Image: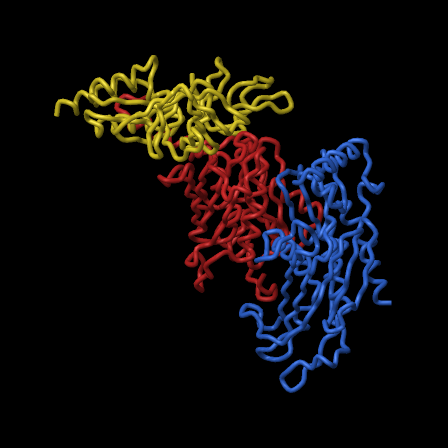
Chain colours: A yellow, B blue, C red
Amino acid sequence: MKEIVMPGDLLFDKPVRQENTFVENGKTYATVMGLFEREKGAVVSLEGAWSPRIGDIVVGIVTGSKNSVYEIELSFFGRAILIGSKYDRQTYKIGDVVESEVKDIENRKTLILWRPRVLYGGTILEVKPTKIPRIIGKNDTMVQQISALTKTTIVVGNNGIIWLKGGNIGLATTAIRTIEDEAHTSGLTERIKQMLETNATK
Amino acid sequence: MEGFDVVKSQYIKEMIAKGMREDGRGMFDFRKIVITPGVIKHAEGSAQVDLGATRVLAGVKLQVEEPMKDTPNDGNMMVSAELLPLAHAEFESGPPSPESIELARVVDRGIRAAECVDMPGLFIEEGKVWSVFIDLYVLNYNGNLFDASTIAAMSALATARMPKFEDGKAIYEERTKPLSLKNHIVSTTFGKVEGALLLDTNIHEENAATARLTIANDGKLIRAMQKGLGGSLSQAEIESLVDVSLSKYAEVKSSIDNLMQ
Amino acid sequence: MASKADRPQLIIGGKRLDGRMPNELRPIRIESSILKNADGSAYLEWGNNRVLAAVYGPKEALPKHMADPAKAIIKCKYAMAPFSSMGEHGRSGPNRRAIEISKVTKEAFENVVLLNDFPGSEIDIFIEILQSDGGTRAAGITAAAVALASAGIHMRDLIYAVSVGKVGEELILDLNMLEDNYSDCDMPMAISPRNGNLVLLQMDGNLTKEQMSRAIEMASEAGKTITRIQKEALQDVYKKAGARSQNGNGV
């Protein structure tokens, strides 16, 4: 049973250190508006900025370079840098769209990226980072379904930036926006499938 | 905050935890108050106040003006404050900072709410009243500008003389009649450091404080309050500080009364 | 404050001129997330007050020397639209009153926002008073708290604000403009409902210590209603989205 909680709402009368909670005087409170499941203890934020974790896949844009160190814009308040490898002949131009992975996080605000891949052509879409898990779906089911039914290549960044290329980008975008709006509802995968199939055959 | 301030704040917090203040004062003691009235002869009233190492100069000027539309029979009053760059390394020139505006407005509210200045007494004739300008010049900043400024403003008002009004204009060379005051206000500002409450914080204590509360009273009633900084205060804390504030009235007022003798 | 001499009778037969009891709030309605571009927003109607609040961030702090490497900084701008008051056209640009309100509002939110979660960043709070009828700083803070929550900003609490005044010796809650003009006291407060602590407190006029204590208690009591309206506004966004789904059953 999920309930919507608000910042400051009392969750437990004992200290439970979980994501998006804080403990004061032995009691646990929520720090964000989010969905709370008593059994799991954590609060899943409904809105807000991306909280980077090591291993997150991100999609960003090269905005600066100096001595093979690249600044990548991720719509994140801190910095993200990609350090070019001397074994890697690949260089990046300002404006390139790059998919990469968070290798390290320094002081919560500087991200070190690695395993880059340039995404040529296509377009990008900004969505709320909190909705990304729903857009990806369990074991990638949601994004694979959209990709299959729209023939669009999709790369989803945990930072809330999605790269799309080819096929019916318009329909893929509509599907993603619908998920963003209704991320907290159930039966979403089936509804999106119906929506895509109906529109794809038109 | 600069590195030195961080170290100082830490030291202040350790002292407070042991129930002590850097300069050995009790938690609710003011620093030494020295009032020097009449330092600016051109002004209708003036006073320089030293509260420990904090120094504020207040000047009062009177000027014939039109009354406000909603108060045609009352004079006007305006308080301004300048945090002069010469008063502290971190004060900068430029347009009024939010800090200086807050300071002026809090001092203004205390004096206005307690009806200290006899506003109807400033009426001259139809369409003409005296405007009282109170300018606060911070000359040296070492904490607690609110109380130092209120003492300076009240001292300057208490010693002010009104220019003569003749042939439709003010004669600034002839000033004999005292400015009429109907009430007196005393301001008390507290800082919260490590959960402890201190009166009249110096600059180091101010840097270590998480919350600030100014309470101005006229000996009987609370006349103005202002909470500052990012901390919070409980109802019980506020109530205890109101008691302290009222208990400080006589002490501060007597230092201004002494100027009149 | 207008002259007391020509003060109209503000309380007749125990009721105020707009029919309210002394401890009664004006009607409050809040809508959350109404601006597309902002990271969080709220529209609030509080009596005749009309207020928009928007939040941007956390984003890169600018100018860079303003950034605090250890925590987020909050910037707050409270402003009244030139057409917001009855009578004359207001001056545009920030006046001294607006600058002070912006400062104390910022400080109120510094108490609850978990600044250490976003080091080096900036969170912008914009409060625009579109129509004013007394108590606009309280209305602005109440709306901004909803905007911050809807932006997903990490906070210790959802704060609210309300003002208490005094007519003669009677305390009245939530003064409208007319009451504010003639009241013997105005005491705006912002409160963190989780622990009842005051994060904003201003006052001018005259109060005994007992009246001050009673004023805090009246504000806290009214806070139960204000908090409920804030939370309902935030939840409504998701209930509506749920209702739009064909077979969505909400959460």
- Rendered location of residue A163, percent (x, y): 30, 27
Q: Give the camera-side residue of A66 and B230.
A: A66
Q: Is residue B224 toward the left or the right of residue C23 in the image?
A: right
Q: Give the camera-side residue of A41 and C205.
A: A41
Residue depicted at 34% across the width and 22% down the height: A117
- Rendered location of residue C87, percent (x, y): 44, 63
Image quarter hosting the N terminus of chain B: top right
Residue depicted at 60% across the width and 75% down the height: B65
Where is residue A164, by image quadrant?
A: top left
Q: Is residue B144 toward the left or the right of residue C201 in the image?
A: right
Q: Residue furthest right?
A: B261
Residue depicted at 35% across the width and 34% down the height: A94
Q: Give the camera-side residue of C126 and C167.
A: C126
Q: Is residue B196 toward the left or the right of residue C26 in the image?
A: right
Q: Is residue C179 toward the left or the right of residue A151 in the image?
A: right
Q: Is residue B218 visible?
A: no
Please determine whether, in this image, residue A3 is positioned above or below residue C45.
above
How many numbered discs?
0
Image quarter hosting the C terminus of chain B: bottom right
- Rendered location of residue C126, percent (x, y): 46, 45
Please determine whether, in this image, residue B243 is positioned above or below residue B152.
above
Please determine whether, in this image, residue C72 is positioned above or below residue B134.
above
Q: Is residue B136 visible?
A: yes
- Rendered location of residue B129, percent (x, y): 62, 75
Q: Residue furthest bottom?
A: B167
Please determine whether, in this image, residue C217 is positioned above or below residue A120.
below
